[in-house]
Amino acid sequence: MTRYLARRLLEAVPLLILISVAVFFLINIIPGGPTAAYENNPHLTPQDLARIERELGLNQPIYVRYVRWLGAVAHGDWGYSLASRRPVLVEIGERLPNTIYLLGVAFAVTLALGIPIGMLSALRQYSLFDHTSTTLAFMGQSVPIFWFGLILIIVFHVSLRNPLTGLPLLPGGGMYTLGEPFSVWDRVSHLILPVSMLTLATAAQYVRYMRASMLEVVHQDYIRTARAKGAGGRRVVWRHAFKNAALPLVTVIALDLPTLFSGALFTETIFSWPGMGRLFYDSALRFDYALLMGIIMVNAALIILSNLAADVVYGCLDPRIRYV
């Protein structure tokens, strides 16, 4: 296993370099740029714009800029944000924990809802619970995530009020209440709406995958054999059926990480959550090239690591899988 992990990590290096090449060239051929905000300023002359481009290094060929960027990254220098003039790593280091915090809670809630509901729906096939959960899962996947977030704000922040204080029932944005001392309920209340927005579509998808996978497994011969030998129902379900039914779901979870990050972009923007999604949105509006590259490369590295973690989980769930 150690050799396999080491090999996969080494293989990730050229993959990240290829991703950086594609992303760097795409970002730099987009119309506009850091100087677009100054072009309509009547007080700036063409000479001033040329000086700004020269200071930012934008007057050099694109391949020269990429080689310089790659060399700086190799030495730990990811550049500086054009807006805040702070190092890119500092900007990402402040926002990444907030996104991981939000996604971690949303992911835990998603698994806590999706897996048990999907399993119970399969074990009670064609029952009222099965029809209800399947219908709700289809509805959850059909609702646009950004529309659902706006509805949550309208209902729980604008319309509904706390009968004791008259304040909104739930906060409509932010990570905590500014100027207030630390409170567990304050942190939890700020999580409820964004976590609900992130959980909706993903939990609905996991319910459908888990139901389909469990239905295929529970009718296998080894399940009938385990029951014929007198094994209890819970033991058959959790020790024999669940491990094999979870393998396809692990693949879906690993592939869903990019979707979670894109969902976090909408969620963090709508709910003013100070995370990577909001930082990416603001950087894209400002054509902050260095910061955009840093955010995308961090996301790419997290996606590669998530796929590697999925391979490790395969071996834990199925002892027949061996890595060399």
Image (cartoon, rainbow, N blue to C red):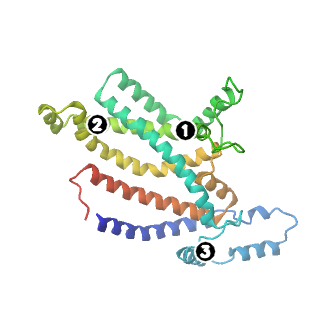
Q: Indicate which disc, 3 or 2, sits on the residue closer to the N terminus.
A: 3
Q: State the SS at label 3.
A: helix
Q: Indicate which disc, 2 or 1, sits on the residue closer to the N terminus.
A: 1
Q: Indicate which disc, 3 or 1, sits on the residue closer to the N terminus.
A: 3
Identify residue for label 2.
214
Asked if residue 17 can be seen in this view, the reply is yes
Identify residue for label 3.
62
Quick one: 20 or 270, which is closer to the camera? 270
Quadrant into which the C terminus falls? bottom left
Residue 137 x, y percent position in the rendering: 43, 32
Quick one: 192 or 278, which is closer to the camera? 192
Question: Badge 2: few (under 14), some or many (20 or more) residues near its Cα, within 10 Å?
Answer: many
Asked if residue 144 can be seen in this view, the reply is no
Asked if the residue at tag 2 contacts the one at tag 3, i.e. Cβ–Cβ closer than 8 Å, the answer is no
The mark closer to the camera, 3 or 1, is: 1
Q: Is residue 28 left or right of residue 198?
A: right
Which amino acid type is shown beneath numbered disc 1?
Met
Residue 255 x, y percent position in the rendering: 41, 51
Quadrant into which the N terminus falls? bottom left
Identify residue for label 1.
197
Question: Badge 3: few (under 14), some or many (20 or more) residues near its Cα, within 10 Å?
Answer: some
Q: Is residue 318 left or right of residue 308?
A: left
Vertical comparison of 21 with 132: above or below: below
Residue found 49% across the figure and 48% down from its top: 259
Residue found 35% across the figure and 26% down from its top: 130
Vertical comparison of 275 with 204: above or below: below
Q: State the SS at label 2.
A: helix
